[in-house]
Image: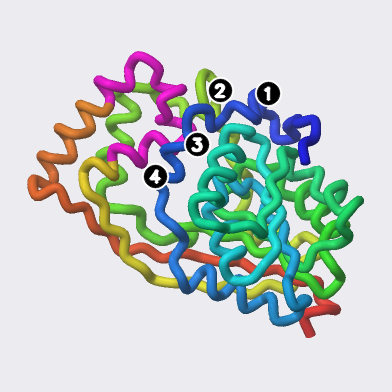
Amino acid sequence: MKQDVHSTTGYTNANGIFASCGAPYVTYRRPHPPAVVDYIASQFGRATAQPRILDLGCGPGTLALDLAERGASVTAVDVSEEMLAAGRDWADARGVRSVTWCQADATEAAALTKDTGLFDGATVADAFHWMDRPRVLAALDRAVRPDGFVAVVGYRAPGTQREWWHPLLEQLRLRWLGSVNLAGPATAYVESAGGHEEVIRRSAFSQVSVLRADYRRTYTLDELVGLQRTYAYSSAATLGDRQGAFEADMRRTLTAARPDGVFEADLQAAVIVGRRPAAAG
């Protein structure tokens, strides 16, 4: 299924923000901690035998494929055809058949129910900050069953520490890309106003529960360098002919900080689940 794509977040290049990121995303982005995926799957208890889940801003299916492997039928939505193509290939490699890939803006969620009916739940993983969140939640109010849920996932819970090497990478990006945080090539990132939980509490899904889950991430130097290719602000498309020098500088900086090439950090993920008050009781 493919629809005309447009942005409602102020980005004129919505389907190009993650240009060049599809294949690196599959290779270098880590899956969400099992506790996070299990918590979302536990919300299926109120759904049908095979719950129907809408995953917005799906990328190549990092969360969608895990949910499908836990028994859900997933409609995975993204504005980037490159990401969706990477997701189709990844699903084939994993033998996952219960994901439908759809190119659309997240605010069009209600239109996706036209042929299939309402969804049992909706998820947004590490992508809500790219969206017009109130409009997306209003669309989900028309797309999700009365007793359904919305789950917003973040690899790092608000207010918790970042990886210890984050300041080093911030300095590198400042040196090579300047002080403007980019949303893909030549476009400035639009900062979201207010936290995700605050926005959800002002929506129809105002009955909120939050899971925080501690976990550890470990990368090699090659993996950490490759990971930068998955971000809109440091992708190959954004860096252009500076990519080689940027990555060489990164290798020197990180090797000086950790000569053994092992990069570990203790983090805390968060899942914010919203339900309509009448259904949450």
Q: Is residue 209 left or right of residue 51?
A: left
- The three-letter code of the residue at mark 3 reads Gly
Kindly indicate the quadrant of the structure image that contains residue 51: bottom right
Q: Determine the residue located farthest toward the bottom in the rendered image.
A: 281
Q: Is residue 176 left or right of residue 31?
A: left
Q: Along the polypeptide, which appears first: circle 2 or circle 4? A: 4
Marks 2 and 1 close (CB-CB < 8 Å): yes
Residue located beneath label 1 in the image:
12
Marks 3 and 2 close (CB-CB < 8 Å): no
The residue depicted at 52 percent of the width and 18 percent of the height is 186
Residue located beneath label 2 in the image:
187
Residue located beneath label 4 in the image:
27
Q: Along the polypeptide, which appears first: circle 1 or circle 4? A: 1
Residue located beneath label 3 in the image:
22
Q: Quarter of the image for the C terminus: give it.
A: bottom right
Question: Is 238 a magenta residue?
Answer: yes
